[in-house]
């Protein structure tokens, strides 16, 4: 019996499965991603991620090209053809992403551990996905206006996705069943009487977490230029409906954390104090309690059928068997644990078993780099509160993913929004100075705002003796 860590297996791996209608959608999106204006370049990828199941793929010679991977390749071709990589500057977050996938791929090639069933060829594809998507987003989502446009794409797509989830909930049939393997019945799954809709996504939990991670961006766009906008509210309503219909506790908890993270914007000047107070509170609770702090997972049951106790036990056993995996992963997986657990629903545990403490440390390095990058983005907003809120939302989105990793190991379409979240922390203001400086009109002449005047270099006296230009 194979006692290694469980990896989700699907019957359609290494098999070409293409529906004609879905193939037409792919061709159209590949053309669009090459042709549209940069601010809409993310939209075709959003459509593929939300309306095409992972079962749809080309597998020449046993090499899987899922449709999301195909559109990623065309996205990379776009930035090369259009020269949109010009001006790209490598930052700490970029380095952390490169290091994570590079070391993980090298680790697999050297076969240091057999704790994961992922082959070097599979990890080559995963590396292509991560580097391709991440640097595509880095090149096309450069400033706050680009992030607004991408968020509008998610908002518009959320409407038909929510409608299809309602249809699935009412009919008990997945509208995307025609995209799945021939033996797939497309019947909506349930657990303890709770329906769990999944649409085109790979799992109901992943579907809910996908949209929970997008809530921060939508929330940041509710108020713009002093007015309440309707579309972000519609997007939040649709995303919330999808999360509820996924019938899983983890996405609902992620949405709650995203909401708290958004509210923390009001206390952004005191975040250092809040972080230390939170850390000391958790530490005190751990020292005072008779059980480990992570046992809180065993008590989480938002909807029927939640498996919080399993998630607690997974973390508990992982920590207790630290000597077995910390150096280079565990070749025996969970077979030596008190209860062998083959459904590794915790991304940190999955990485630890696959490559040891270094893999977990690399993920932490990515998270820390992303938070620092988001902080620089906030400072680049130059006092524009709306931009500051957008920059803040990028950090909240990363936080939402970080907490979701405790309950689910990502695969399928959700990796797209994870790489998107990392990439957009690097957005910066296109103007080094706030655009809210006031201007004065006198006698038909317009004086520059004080902020712009302060930013000007001081000219020699002779050059300053220029008449004002009528505008």
Image: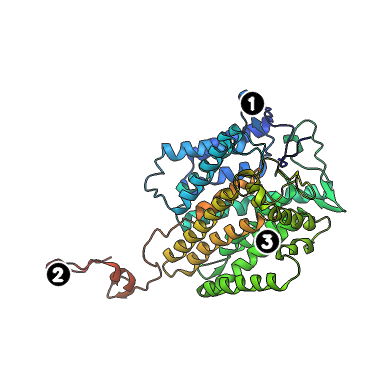
Mark toward the start of the polypeptide (3 vs 1): 1
Give the labeled residue for mark 2. Answer: 465
Mark toward the start of the polypeptide (2 vs 1): 1
Q: Taking the image as drawn, is residue 158 in sight?
A: no
For residue 72, above or below residue 273: above
| CA distance for labels 3 and 1 | 38 Å
What number of labels is visible? 3
Mark identifier at residue 163: none
Judging depth in this view, the residue of 20 and 364 nearest the camera is: 364
Residue at left 75%, top 43%? 335
Judging depth in this view, the residue of 271 and 146 nearest the camera is: 271
Extreme left residue here? 462
Residue 382 in the image: state x and y as whole percent: 41, 67
Give the labeled residue for mark 3. Answer: 255
* Quadrant in which residue 45 is drawn: top right
Mark identifier at residue 62: 1
SS for dot 1: helix
Side (left or right) of 42 relative to 455: right
Mark toward the start of the polypeptide (3 vs 2): 3
């Amino acid at each position: 019996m194979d006692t290694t860590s469980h990896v989700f297996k699907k019957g359609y791996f290494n098999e070409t499965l293409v529906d004609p209608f879905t193939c037409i959608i792919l061709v159209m999106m590949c053309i669009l991603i090459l042709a549209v204006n940069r601010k809409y370049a993310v939209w075709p990828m959003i459509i593929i991620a939300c309306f095409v199941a992972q079962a749809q793929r080309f597998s020449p010679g046993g090499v899987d090209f899922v449709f999301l991977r195909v559109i990623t390749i065309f996205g990379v071709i776009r930035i090369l053809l259009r020269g949109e990589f010009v001006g790209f500057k490598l930052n700490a977050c970029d380095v952390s992403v490169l290091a994570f996938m590079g070391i993980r791929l090298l680790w697999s090639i050297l076969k240091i551990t057999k704790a994961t069933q992922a082959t070097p060829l599979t990890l080559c594809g995963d590396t292509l996905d991560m580097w391709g998507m991440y640097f595509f987003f880095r090149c096309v989502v450069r400033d706050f206006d680009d992030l607004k446009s991408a968020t509008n794409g998610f908002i518009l797509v959320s409407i038909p996705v929510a409608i299809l989830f309602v249809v699935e909930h009412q009919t008990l049939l997945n509208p995307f069943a025609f995209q799945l393997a021939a033996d797939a019945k497309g019947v909506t799954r349930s657990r303890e009487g709770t329906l769990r809709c999944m649409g085109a996504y790979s799992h109901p939990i992943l579907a809910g977490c996908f949209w929970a991670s997008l809530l921060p961006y939508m929330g940041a766009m509710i108020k713009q230029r002093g007015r309440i906008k309707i579309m972000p509210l519609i997007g939040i309503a649709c995303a919330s409906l999808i999360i509820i219909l996924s019938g899983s506790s983890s996405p609902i908890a992620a949405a709650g954390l995203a909401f708290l993270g958004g509210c923390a914007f009001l206390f952004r000047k005191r975040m250092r104090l809040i972080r230390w107070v939170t850390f000391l509170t958790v530490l005190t609770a751990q020292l005072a309690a008779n059980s480990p702090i992570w046992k809180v997972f065993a008590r989480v049951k938002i909807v029927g059928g939640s498996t919080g106790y399993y998630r607690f036990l997974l973390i508990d056993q992982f920590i207790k068997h630290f000597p077995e995996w910390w150096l280079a992963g565990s070749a025996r997986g969970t077979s030596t644990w008190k209860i062998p657990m083959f459904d590794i629903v915790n991304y940190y545990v999955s990485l630890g078993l696959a490559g040891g403490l270094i893999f977990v440390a690399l993920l932490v390095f990515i998270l820390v780099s992303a938070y620092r990058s988001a902080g620089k983005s906030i400072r680049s907003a130059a006092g524009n509160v709306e931009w500051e809120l957008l920059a803040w939302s990028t950090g909240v989105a990363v936080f939402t993913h970080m907490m979701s990793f405790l309950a689910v190991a990502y695969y399928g379409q959700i990796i797209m929004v994870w790489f998107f979240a990392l990439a957009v922390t690097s957005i910066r203001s296109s103007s080094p100075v706030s655009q809210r400086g006031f201007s004065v009109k006198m006698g038909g002449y317009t004086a520059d705002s004080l902020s712009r005047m302060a930013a000007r270099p001081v000219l020699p006296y002779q050059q300053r003796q220029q008449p004002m230009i009528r505008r």
